[in-house]
Amino acid sequence: MSRNSTHSSSTASGLALSQQNFLLAAAFIMPLTFSVWQALLNNFVVERAAFTGAEIGMLQSLREVPGFLAFTAVFVLLVVREQRFALGSLLVMSVGVALTPFFPSTYGLYATTVVMSMGFHYFETINKSLTLQWIEKTQTPHFMGKAMAVKAAGALLAYSSIWLLMEWVGFGFTAMYLLAGGIGVVITLALWVAFPHFPEGAVQHKKLIFRRRYWLYYALTFLSGARRQIFMVFAGFMMVEKFGYSAADISLLYLANYVFNLFFAPRIGSWVGRVGERRALRVEYVGLIIVFSSYAFVENANVAAGLYIVDHLFFALSIAINTYFQKISDPKDIAATSSVSFTINHIAAVFIPALLGILWLTSPSAVFLVGSAIAVSSLVLCSFIPDAPDQGRETRFSS
């Protein structure tokens, strides 16, 4: 091998490592800041703004609107490059968190929530797009597992800081929100300075794209969003309503989930890379059918807690949906399709909580059986994924 080819290989390897470090650092900031907002929200809005169920319901609905509108990211890319867009989104999210305690009124909290959520959802959209563009297909499952572990570490640091600073140091809501938002801003600006602007790969389409050959990816993404809404909204609510779990108990469940992700997510990612997307998703969906069916009839608080943790662990396998898309997609479609898929994933967030909330009043078990039915539908669809997905081999029926 010539000296020039050796140098080129070394340069490419160094670039890939720098890109991975950038993505991991950005992935760490997001939960470090967002987890503080999320953990303190319910107590803050009740104690400082006298929220009732009506106001918190409206706030949570408004929080999901930027996710539903994530497709607009493709239009922002007309004027802002993706790496800058990702960092700008982190800044917006961090500023939204820092401003939260200064507007302790109904409309003030609605406004700061929308600002925070815009940054959060745009970052998640662009971060997914950059990951699929920058990381080699053979490395993507392991890297996504590693990124989940990094996010878990950020969330664990946030939760432990809340306990330490508020219980032992005497920090109040204002100090915690300011600290979390301020740290987010400082680290994001540090990333802006520390990392160069990486060269773009395939030039991305700057328009909305719906391709017929991506139909299976769209369908799996939609069903994934629907299942996740049932878990996020109703699993935790059942723990409180049916089994009397306190806020501290729920926090411990969150911590257990993040500890599992910290240690097992990279291994799960590597396993997905070895066995392939179809087999990994089959394991996830069969597991979720069992978990949701068990939720419907569980009568023991400890068993319910175990199901909650296992449920969260199965969702780590959903990275297989993204690696499947990476294999079948035209590289130029990734940014536009990531934006569209994020909107598709959030369609369920608009109507699932409201519709199933009505069903919950008459039959909580039926809500979880709906989740089982959605998992069954996903299991059927994932069987269409071919052994070796690629452009032109999007499904097992592709010619």
Image (cartoon, rainbow, N blue to C red):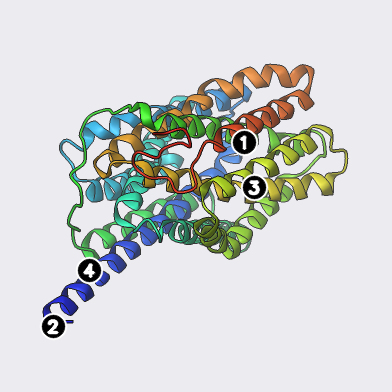
| Residue holding disc 3 | 283
Residue closer to the observer: 298 or 169: 298
Q: Which amino acid does label 1 sit on?
A: Leu
Q: Which mark is on residue 14? A: none
Q: Which of marks 4 and 3 is nearer the N terminus?
A: 4
| Image vertical order of residue 321 relative to residue 265, above or below | above
Could you tell me if residue 31 is visible in this image?
Answer: yes
Closest to the observer: 97 or 6?
6
Question: Which residue has dot 1 on it?
Answer: 379
Q: Please tell me the numbered disc located at residue 3.
A: 2
Closest to the observer, 260 or 399: 399
The Cα atoms of the two marked residues, 4 and 2, are separated by: 14 Å
**Residue under numbered circle 4:** 12
- Within-10-Å neighbours for mark 2: few <14, some 14–19, many 20+: few
**Residue 190 location in percent, x, y?**
27, 62
Which image quarter is the C terminus in?
top left
